[in-house]
Amino acid sequence: MKLLAALLLVCCLTASSNATSNFCNFCLRLIKEVQVGAHRFSKKETLIQKAEGICEKFGQEIDALGGESTLVEVPCITMFVNKFDTMAYEIRTHADPMMVCQKIRIC
């Protein structure tokens, strides 16, 4: 629920009209970026560190728009860590990001 609230704030800050679409786009972007360089034997810790860096980058983008980065970074990291076991295989095998985000019910 906290993730959804933070993502809603992100959507408002970026002045988008379709919150559901933005949640999905946020997830797709995160999964795509984590998949870069991932392989079948990538360690969980390595992928989580990569996600943390990506979430930090998302926060910096929000800062540049005048928002509060922690409202994006913390929920982003929390979502990835909490859902990691559900989507680990798909990330490691470069499954379609849309399928991954649908699996964790964000798209």
Image (tube, helix red, strand yellow):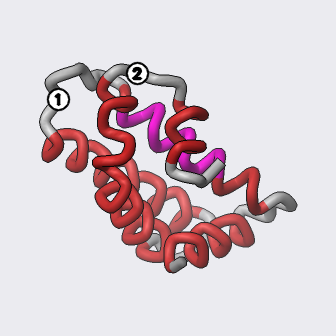
Few, some or many C-alpha atoms within 10 Å of disc 1 (few <14, some 14-19, many ≥20)? some
State the residue position of label 1: 42
Asked whether the beta carbons under mark 1 and mark 2 sit within 8 Å of each other, the answer is no
Residue 88 on image: x %, y %: 31, 38
Residue 93 percent across, percent down from the top left: 34, 20
The amino acid sitting under disc 2 is His
Q: How many marks?
A: 2
Q: Quadrant of residue 99?
A: top right
SS under mark 1 = loop
Is residue 33 rendered magenta in the image?
Answer: yes
For the residues labelled 1 and 2, the Cα–Cα distance comes to: 12 Å
Determine if the magenta segment contains residue 77: no
Q: Is residue 41 above or below residue 69?
A: above
Q: Is residue 68 above or below residue 104?
A: below
| In the depicted structure, whether residue 76 falls above or below residue 105 | below
Secondary structure state at the residue bearing disc 2 = loop
What residue type is disc 1 on?
Ser
Residue 94 can be seen in this image: yes
Quarter location, residue 50 = top left
Residue at coordinates 58% horizontally, 50% vertically from top-left? 26
Q: Which residues are magenta?
A: 24-34
In depth, the one of 8 and 13 nearer the eye is 8
In which quadrant of the rendered view does residue 55 lie?
Answer: bottom left
Q: Nearer the viewer, residue 85 or 55?
A: 85
- Measured as percent of width and height from the top left, residue 51 is found at 32, 48
Image mark for residue 34: none
Rendered position, 49 above or below 9: above
In which quadrant of the rendered image does the N terminus lie?
bottom right
Give me the residue at 40% from left, 21% from top: 94
Q: Which residue is mark 2?
A: 94
